[in-house]
Amino acid sequence: MSTQTTTKAGALDQWISELSTAGLDAPWAQPGPLIRPKASAMKPRVWRWREIEPHVRRTPEFMQPGRGAERRILRLDNPGVPERTAGHTISVAVQYLLPGEVAPAHRHTPNAIRFMLHGEGAYTTIEGDKYAMRRGDLVVTPSMTWHDHGNEGAGPVIWTDGLDSPIVRYLETLHMEPFEGETQPVRTGPPARHLCYRWATAYAELVRRSTGEPDPFDDIIMEYVDPATGRSVVPALGCFLQMLRPGARTRAHRETSSAVYHVVAGSGYTEIDGVRHEWSEGDFVAVPPRAAHAHGNAGSAPAILFSFQDVPLLKALGFYRVEPA
Ligand code: GTQ
Ligand code: FE2
């Protein structure tokens, strides 16, 4: 019986090794479907501000920003993601500068988005335009623009960075270079591009929307868009500000995109694949792609969430889907 089979199997093995030598693969020779399923590497998780903050405040003991150690950051580490970023498409960090410190100028292919958290006197200079960063302000550093930061205040400053670096890394187009000199010369006059979105403007728009029709999945939500183009703040990533009104509970849904939330104010919870994650001011929450999720606010004050999401990337590629769960 099996002589022929064995011979055939032997011949197949022999042939597969010849294929391999020729740089070819016969995927049907392996059991299982042709396009194998892949679980999301990105896992749901919460990072607590009460844990982040003391570690961030200790970083100056171990690191001084300067040449070769350009940014004093702690990155949010999602244990499922091989590159140890908050999401598989989004890298999120918390950055800390003491009074008088400078984070030297450089540029790189990843786009960066900064959302200001604490302290007075922080600034970012982008292509010679200097922007003061106050609590709740969002500042965009587009791909390959020169940027340096500093703290001209009397106390420490803290902000959060969101970068599309995991996407750039996947596309094998990571590039970074230092500026000649610590800081860029600052230009005067109006900035060349719209890169700064002030808190007062964003929050006023959110409050204005809070009297209108709520979104079933997100309650009251708005996206930051470039006024010149109507597009997301950077090509692959969008930023959102949302309000969960007291007593709100949104409808559970799945999206092909992923998100990292930061709690600007208030408290509430996000249920992800049936697990309830409570959060309060300063916390970060990761929601993986295709996970069923719903947000709620059981308290008596509004909860305000800021988020980095890869919705624009999914939309550009034709892969964005949302469905009730
Ligand atoms: O501030 O320029 O979190 O280059 C990661 C890389 C921040 C920055 C990060 C960066 C920066
Ligand atoms: Fe940078």
Image (cartoon, rainbow, N blue to C red):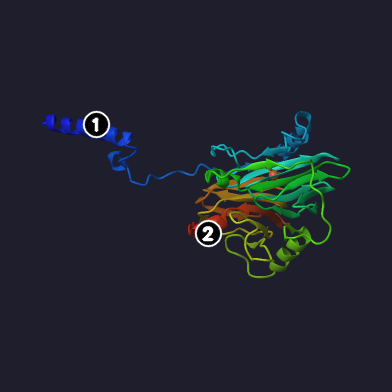
Q: Quadrant of the N terminus?
A: top left
Nearest to N terminus: mark 2 or mark 1: 1
* Image position, residue 78 (x, y; %): 58, 39
Count how many numbered circles sit on residues in the image: 2
Residue closest to the far bottom:
212
On screen, residue 302 above or below 91 = below
Tell me: 30 left or right of 271. Answer: left
Disc 2 versus disc 1: distance between alpha carbons? Answer: 44 Å
Placement of 20 over or under 279, stated as above or below:
above
Specify whether 260 is left or right of 59. left
Q: Quadrant of residue 57?
A: top right
Name the residue that disc number 1 marks: 14
Residue 216, quarter of the rendered image: bottom right
Image coords of residue 158 (percent x, y): 77, 44
Image coordinates of residue 82 in percent, x first then y, are 54, 37
Q: Is mark 1 within 8 Å of ligand 1?
A: no
Q: Nearer the viewer, residue 54 or 142?
A: 142
Circle 1: residue type:
Gln
Q: Residues within 10 Å of mark 2 (few under 14, many from 20)?
A: few
Q: Amino acid at mark 2?
A: Ala
Secondary structure type for disc 2: helix
- Front residue of 274 and 323: 323
Which residue is drawn at the image coordinates 83% and 41% (left, top)?
A: 156
> Which residue is label 2 attached to?
316
Secondary structure, mark 1, is helix
